[in-house]
Image (cartoon, rainbow, N blue to C red):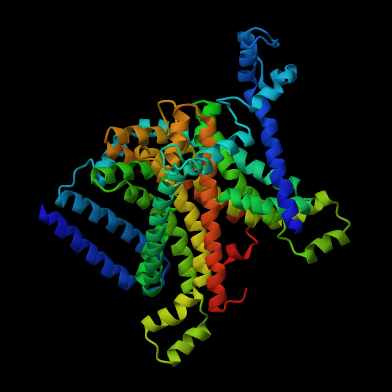
Amino acid sequence: MKSFLSILTVVAALIAFWYAACVPMNIHEAAIQAQRAGVDVTPAEAPERRKTGRISLALQNTGLWSTVFTQERPQLPAPHQVAQEFWKTTWGMIERGRAFSKRSLILHGWITLSATLLGFAFGTALGIVLAVSIVHSRAMDMSVMPWIIASQTVPILAIAPMIVVVLAALSVDDIVAKGVISMYLSFFPVVVGMVKGLRSPDAMQMDQMKTWNATRTETLWKLRLPSSAPYLFASLKVGVAASLIGAVVAELSLSSNGGLGARLLAGSYYGQTVQIWSALFAAAALAAVLVWAIGVAQKITLKRMGFAQ
Amino acid sequence: MMAWVFGSLVFWLAAWALNARLSRLSATWVRFFVPTLFGVTVIVVWEGMVRGFGVNPVLLPAPSAIAATFVGEIPTLWGDLVQTFFKGALSGYVIGCTAGVLTAIAVDRSPFLQRGLLPVGNFVAALPIVGMAPILVMWFGFGWQSKAAVVVVMVFFPMLVNAVEGLQASESMQRDLMRTYAATPGQGLRKLRLPAAMPFIFNGLKICTTLALIGAIVAEFFGSPIKGMGFRISTEVGRLALDMVWAEIVVAAIVGSAFYGAVALAERVVTFWHPSQRG
């Protein structure tokens, strides 16, 4: 309860800061519009105003502060503008029975989500397979593991446009192309976590399996895999967030079919800042829901498996 | 042509057999030789397959072609590197990481704020912050400043979370000892809590090296002057000159690894006392 209050304070402080930042960010545009409407603005000349800094202009025109939160294309939209747009393009679309129209964030969110989940599933599978083979083969461990770690110091997202174009040339479906990038980003946390998890049974437990004359396969199924579950879930949380980032960035290069990344790009082309921010919040909400869902699955599974909570 | 395919396959099998045998030894040189041989194998098989099957260079250029482009285009690559890494990524990294640590120190005296900041910071660190790039490019223009701004936003929260956690890392016994010495809060911070936080801070710094490069490159997809690694990648992909794209990726890989290595080296020097550095 106490920490809930602290979180609330921090979030409130962030929102207050956001509102405050709207004033200097949008004041130039507000001054132009006010002058057109015949309101007195200091300094009155446009060139001179352009030279004036944001903050000093804001201080000279305190009367304009109320107009900075209602602009059509603000430099920085106010939180409630973003919330309205978000609401209009999600629930508002459902109410009008057009949940999957081109303007609906539900449609774009669904496109991104499907690519994310596809890449996440394949990334997790690849990660587990790699981890199992690394744990069982010393040669794999020594030759592949350093490269897997090194691969993460490479800015993999930079390759996204190329992978997308190459896969498109091979006439692969768009969703697969995005999924490949998501997969690349999400397999790493799974490999690292699973290698740790598969090696987590202690020597006593391994000896016990040996006493029972268990084969390596039996040891894997009955001891190693079950005891790696907590590690797996921890890495799945990291992996799914990375996977979503991969899908969004892939959509920057594959924007013709929609998706949250495509909304970002379209918004930046046409200066629709409110649209950019609401797409950004949709992506954030999606990430939060995905991580939360895995958290719930983690709690239930680990409880059933008898891990101490 | 088939000779290339068979040749590379034979090389692969031979290298794998050698690695399987070597991995049973435990000499130090084996630890470096085995992964190196694996890397060489990948390149040889890649070259062999591309030549053997006559893969279209628009899809996948051969390593030799990439190397030739790399050597031939060094001035361009260097210009892109300066623009993206030294101007954009590095300045943003320094500003963002410093801001993160300073914020952590600022809220250090208030457990109330810390309790709120940790979950919020952890949440924000998991968000696709790189999506902020179009907004920041709109604000700060096409130059390197906007790339630095993207990097600042990307590295701030991971750094903040790690620094806040690190400042809580000293044990209560140690803090009590400082109190016994009548140390002021400032002294306690300088002599105990900051040094104790260093492993966490370096963990954050290492995570942020990759984020910084990603942020700077992806931000260039939204607009940049006519140089920079992200700009080059997106335009050369459009021209289907994939060998140049791969050359940029090689540069990114080298710089990324070197950056990470430099931070890891600094960590070794600063946190020499930590158990993870003594083994």
Front in this rendered view, residue A232 or B85: A232
- Residue B167 at what x, y percent from top left? 71, 55
* A73 lies above or below A11: above
Q: Position of residue A301 (x, y in %)?
A: 52, 72
Can residue B138 be seen here? Answer: yes
- Across and down, in percent, residue B3 comes to 11, 56
Is residue A238 rendered to the left or right of residue A34? left
Viewer can see residue B30: no
Image position of A86 (left or right of B2): right
Q: Which of these two is toward me, B29 or A41?
A: A41
Q: Residue at x 67, y 31 (%)?
A: A21
| Residue A294 in the image, given as x and y percentages of width and height | 52, 62
The answer to which of A59 and A53 lies nearer the viewer is: A59
Extreme residue in the top direction:
A45
Q: Residue at x 53, y 57 (%)?
A: A291
Side of A95 where A178 appears, left or right = left
- Point out the residue furthest to the front here: A96
Residue at x 51%, y 85% (from the top left corner): A205
